[in-house]
Amino acid sequence: MDKSASELVGAEQFRLGMRSLASAVNLITAAHAGHRYGMTATAVTSVSAEPPTLLVCINRKASTHGAIAKSGAFCINVLRAGHVEHSRAFSGAQLGEARFSSGEWTRLATGAPVLIDALVSFDCRVEKEIAHGTHTLFLGRVEHIVAGGKGRSLLYADGQYGKFATLGERVLPGELPDSLDWGIG
Ligand SMILES: Cc1cc2nc3c(=O)[nH]c(=O)nc-3n(C[C@H](O)[C@H](O)[C@H](O)COP(=O)(O)O)c2cc1C
C-alpha cells in the first residue's frame, strides 16, 4: 500500500536530517508599538540580488512573528563567532525586552533594532508573506546594509555552535571592506 508523504517522513526525522545542515546564526528583530522583539534564527536565505531580497522563516508562535507582520519590517543581524551568548539570550535564555541587554543596539530606515557589533545587518521591508505549515516565510527587500568590519560567522550544526574555518584557497577574489554602510536610493 502506498504511504502518504507525511507518513514517510515525520517531524522528528526531518529535524534529525536538518542537524547536518550547517547554518549561520542570526538575530531577527522587529519593533512594534514602542516595543522591541527579537529571536535567534538560522532559516535565512538570499533570494535575489536584483532586487536585493532576503527570506526568513519564522514560527507563527514566536513573539517576533506578530511584530514583523504588523510593522512590515525586520532586520537580520548576522552574528560573529563570539556572539554565542546573544544567540542563547534570543532563543529563550532571556525574554522580551531583556534580550536587548545582550549587545548594543541602534535602528536604521525601517526602525527594526540593529545590533551595532553584528558581522553585517540587513534592514528589510516586508514585500511578501507566505504561510506554510507552522511557519511564515517573510520576503524582505533590503533597504540598508551595515557591516561592522572583519570577523568570522557564528555557525550552528549538529545541535552545536561552531565557527567557520577556511580550507585555503579563496573562491571569490578580494577581501571584505573594513566596514560599509549602504542604503538604497
Ligand atoms: C540555533 C537556533 C536557530 C533557530 N532558528 C529558528 C528559525 O530559523 N526560525 C524560527 O522560527 N525559530 C528558530 N529558532 C527558535 C527560536 O529562536 C526560539 O523559539 C525563540 O525563543 C522564539 O522566540 P520567543 O521565545 O520570543 O517566542 C532557532 C533557535 C536556535 C537556538
Image (tube, rainbow, N blue to C red):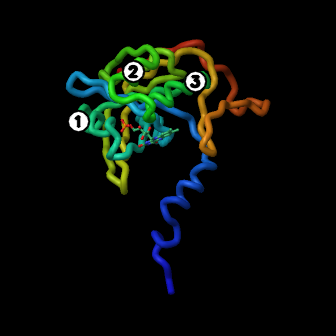
Res. 80 mark: 3
Residue 70 location, quadrant: top left
Residue in the image at 46% along x and 28% along y: 89
Residue pushed farthest left? 33
First in residue order: circle 2 vs circle 1:
1
User: From this viewpoint, is residue 72 visible?
Assistant: yes
The residue carrying pointer 1 sits among few (fewer than 14), some (14 to 19) or many (20 or more) residues within 10 Å by Cα, namely few
First in residue order: circle 1 vs circle 3:
1
The residue carrying pointer 3 sits among few (fewer than 14), some (14 to 19) or many (20 or more) residues within 10 Å by Cα, namely many
- Number of numbered tags placed on the structure image: 3
Of badges 2 and 1, the one in the foreground is 2
Residue 56 location, quadrant: top left
Query: x, y percentage for residue 146?
Result: 46, 18
| Ligand 1's quadrant | top left
Residue of label 2: 100
Residue in the image at 32% along x and 37% along y: 63
Image height of 183 relative to 163, above or below: above
Q: CA distance from mark 2 to mark 1?
A: 20 Å
Image height of 162 relative to 134, above or below: above
Going by the numbered disc 3, the residue's amino acid type is: Arg
The residue carrying pointer 2 sits among few (fewer than 14), some (14 to 19) or many (20 or more) residues within 10 Å by Cα, namely some
Query: x, y percentage for residue 148?
Result: 53, 15
Query: x, y percentage for residue 129?
Result: 31, 45
Q: Secondary structure at mark 2?
A: helix
Residue of label 1: 70
